[in-house]
Image (cartoon, rainbow, N blue to C red):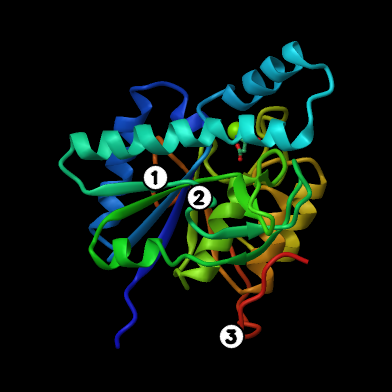
Amino acid sequence: MEQKKCIVLKFGGASVSSPEAFASIAEIILQRRSLYQQVVVVVSAMGDTTDDLIALAHKVNPNPPRRELDMLVSVGERISIALLAMALAAKNTEAISFTGSQSGILTTNDHANAKIILVKPQRLLPQLDNGKIVIVAGFQGMSQSGDITTLGRGGSDTTAVALAIALQAEKVEFYKDVNGIYDKDPKKFTDAKLINQLSYKQAYTIMEQGAQVLHARCVRLAEKNSLPLKVLPFNNFLDEKLGTTIQDTVKLKNTISYED
Ligand code: ASP
Ligand code: MG
């Protein structure tokens, strides 16, 4: 059977910081839907929601049990997936949201810093085959004992990459409030230059120097599976001069592997 063209789109907290923002990102998703048969969207919690939930927990207990903290903070992404599915429904587009555990994201039991060990996207596949846009909550999974886990701050990027690997997607596009990756921090240096192409190694080096554009673990996971990544601005995504692609020219292997 012919493989269907699949893409994973990741939207960070800054791109969903207000209720109106969901309608804007729905437009980006619809544009991509016209190019790919299968579209999976991973979304983070709105704006400062995760920080607010952590602060809330600490008001109740200065040292919250880690299992319960994960139960609480994973709610942030759950709000976003439901609202995004509603925004797409308002545009007469069929979409369905899933939590990390419903999406089959299986992790270690390290609450607040769990690693993805396997993705079993069985519930997503029939929805994608039916042409629905599948929306997955970033940052979260389920441990082997069935508890909700989270992947560490900024972990939704890693969710997007792991799903793309499991679904054999062509690439992951990360929609951010920056034009791509720069040679130095563009918020601090006015002469910072946008870089259009990077190898995985070059991406690590830049990130080690302090550019917090992607979750470092997601770059490692993409490199292991030769999955191309693209960082692009959500407010100007059609401008081809913008954006940074991270990939290597040589494809290393054809087998799937998850986090170490
Ligand atoms: N919402 C989580 C955080 O703020 C995960 C993410 O944004 O990727 O860390
Ligand atoms: Mg966030």
Q: Nearer the viewer, residue 43 or 253?
A: 43
Identify the disc placed on residue 254. Answer: 3
Question: Where's ligand 1: which quadrant?
Answer: top right
Where 63 sits versus 116, above or below?
above
Q: Gap between marks 1 and 2, in whole Å?
A: 8 Å
Residue 224 position in % (x across, y down): 69, 72
User: In this view of the protein, can residue 30 be seen by the observer?
Assistant: yes
**Which of pointers 3 and 1 lies earlier in the amino acid sequence?**
1
43 versus 254 height, above or below: above
* SS at circle 2: loop
Q: Earlier in the sequence, mark 1 or mark 2?
A: 1
What number is the disc on residue 237?
1
Q: Residues within 10 Å of mark 1 (few under 14, many from 20)?
A: some
Residue 223 lies, in percent from the top left, at 67, 69
Query: Would you identify the image quadrant in which residue 92 lies?
Result: top left
Task: For marks 3 and 1, give the CA distance.
Answer: 30 Å
Q: Which residue is mark 2?
A: 243
Residue visible at 50% across and 64% down in the picture: 164
In-image side of 216 versus 102 (left or right): right
Looking at this rendering, what residue extends furthest in the top direction?
59
Residue 75, labelled with which disc?
none
Q: Is residue 95 left or right of residue 243?
A: left
Foreground residue among 27 and 47: 47
Q: Residue at horizontal 30%, vertical 85%?
A: 2
CA gap, disc 3 and disc 2:
27 Å
- Binning the other alpha carbons within 10 Å of mark 3 as few (below 14), some (14 to 19) or many (20 upward) gives few
| Quadrant in which the N terminus is drawn | bottom left
Question: Is ligand 1 within 8 Å of the beta carbon of the residue shown at mark 3?
Answer: no
Give yes or no for contact between labels 1 and 2 (Cβ–Cβ under 8 Å). Answer: yes
Residue type beneath disc 2: Gly
Quarter of the picture holding the C terminus: bottom right
Which amino acid type corresponds to the residue marked 1 in the rendered image?
A: Phe
